[in-house]
Image (cartoon, rainbow, N blue to C red):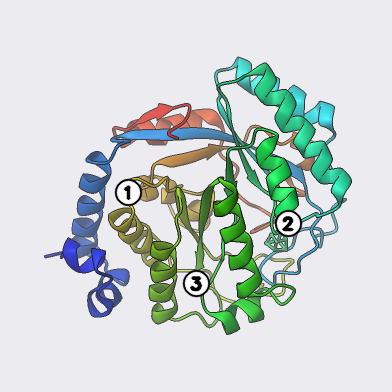
């Protein structure tokens, strides 16, 4: 029997056991996660959002990522290109936009994105803008918040400081957490989480990730599966384990009933029906890859060069197949 109370108390022994479940016991864990989701404020609804990848330029050097290193050219979408894309997607009914880029702290880039946010919310006051642009200064976060963005995603990736340094040598866990706390204090609805299966990561590291996620005041929580990107320094390491990732997501749902949890396209890489399994494990957010101009999709190589970029119909089908309902936003 899965003991929900022990999960809520972050009982180390039980969580170590649950993180590695397979077969019928794993199904029982997913069942419990789905019941908790059904009883949450969002019930069986799934946020269907669009991602617009606005630039592949990045000042960090994460070893699992090949952004800007796969021989493809660098790009920054212009103000006009982003606004036109938002207009065309909004006219189709989309209301949540994830603007994602590498980490680029140049002030003119931040000014440009601020102007995009201002214009977009003036055109469509009911839209939600989520930014995922890495570590920036407090003033830059504030500028972006004041311009109309309401959410920000900044994953800590791993809560183990030395593993963090190994995987992300150009940053520190301490600085990453300072940025996450700045975002929370500024008033963003913040998303954060980890990567499951990083080289050298242990089950106890995952447990510590859960403790950290539980401590932070987050609106969105996530776990992505490590993918050995061909052009990255980690290309020869094995991929993260799909079952451990799904179990981690189910435990997250039990710990955070009212948080948004994405079923990411990383779950599909090397696994059949991975995103469907994510929804069955308790996730409630799916991202449609219809915002990045096709000519730049291959240039945005954060986790994988041959990444899966699901289109709207695929996303709607997997949501329908698990008897959930796609809606424009949850928060
Ligand atoms: S993972 Fe993100 S922050 Fe790290 S190098 Fe890639 S784009 Fe930059």
Corner quadrant of residue 171:
bottom right
The structure residue drawn at horizontal position 61% and vertical position 66%, both measured from the top left corner, is: 178
Considering the numbered disc 1 on the image, is that residue within a helix, a strand or a loop? loop
Within 8 Å: ligand 1 and the Cβ of disc 2?
Answer: no
Disc nearer the start of the sequence (2/1): 2
**Front position in the image: 155 or 312:** 155
Q: Which residue is mark 3?
A: 197
The label number, if any, that marks residue 179 in the structure image: none
Query: Is 201 situated above or below 22?
Result: below
Considering the numbered disc 2 on the image, is that residue within a helix, a strand or a loop? loop
Disc nearer the start of the sequence (3/1): 3
Query: Is 45 situated above or below 178?
Result: above
Q: Which residue is mark 1?
A: 282
Disc nearer the start of the sequence (2/3): 2
Mark 1: few, some, or many residues within 10 Å (few <14, many ≥20)?
many
Considering the numbered disc 3 on the image, is that residue within a helix, a strand or a loop? loop
The structure residue drawn at horizontal position 51% and vertical position 64%, both measured from the top left corner, is: 194
């Amino acid at each position: 029997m899965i003991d929900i109370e022990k999960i809520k108390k972050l009982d180390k022994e039980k969580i170590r056991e649950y993180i590695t479940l397979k077969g019928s016991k794993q199904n029982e864990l997913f069942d419990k996660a789905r019941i908790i989701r059904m009883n949450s404020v969002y019930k069986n609804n799934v946020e269907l959002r669009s991602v617009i990848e606005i630039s592949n330029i990045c000042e960090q050097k994460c070893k699992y990522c090949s952004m800007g290193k796969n021989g493809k050219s660098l790009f920054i979408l212009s103000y006009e290109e982003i606004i036109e894309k938002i207009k065309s997607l909004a006219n189709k009914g989309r209301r949540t936009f994830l603007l994602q880029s590498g980490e680029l702290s140049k002030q003119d880039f931040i000014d440009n994105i601020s102007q995009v946010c201002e214009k977009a919310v003036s055109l469509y006051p009911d839209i939600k803008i989520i930014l995922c642009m890495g570590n920036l200064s407090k003033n830059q976060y504030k500028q972006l918040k004041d311009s109309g963005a309401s959410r920000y995603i900044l994953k800590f990736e791993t809560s183990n400081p030395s593993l963090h340094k190994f995987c992300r040598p150009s940053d520190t866990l301490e600085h990453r957490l300072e940025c996450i706390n700045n975002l929370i204090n500024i008033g963003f609805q913040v998303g954060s989480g980890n990567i499951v299966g990083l080289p050298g990561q242990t089950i106890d590291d995952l447990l510590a990730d859960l403790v950290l996620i539980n401590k932070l005041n987050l609106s969105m929580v996530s776990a992505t599966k490590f993918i050995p990107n061909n052009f990255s320094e980690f290309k020869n390491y094995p991929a993260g384990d799909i079952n451990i990732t799904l179990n981690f997501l189910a435990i997250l749902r039990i710990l955070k009933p009212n948080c948004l949890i994405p079923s990411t396209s990383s779950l599909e890489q090397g696994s059949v029906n991975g995103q469907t399994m994510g929804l069955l494990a308790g996730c409630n957010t799916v991202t449609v890859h219809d915002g990045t101009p096709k000519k730049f999709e291959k240039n945005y190589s954060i986790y994988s060069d041959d990444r899966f970029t699901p289109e709207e119909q695929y996303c709607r089908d997997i949501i329908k197949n698990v008897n959930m309902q796609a809606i424009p936003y949850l928060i």
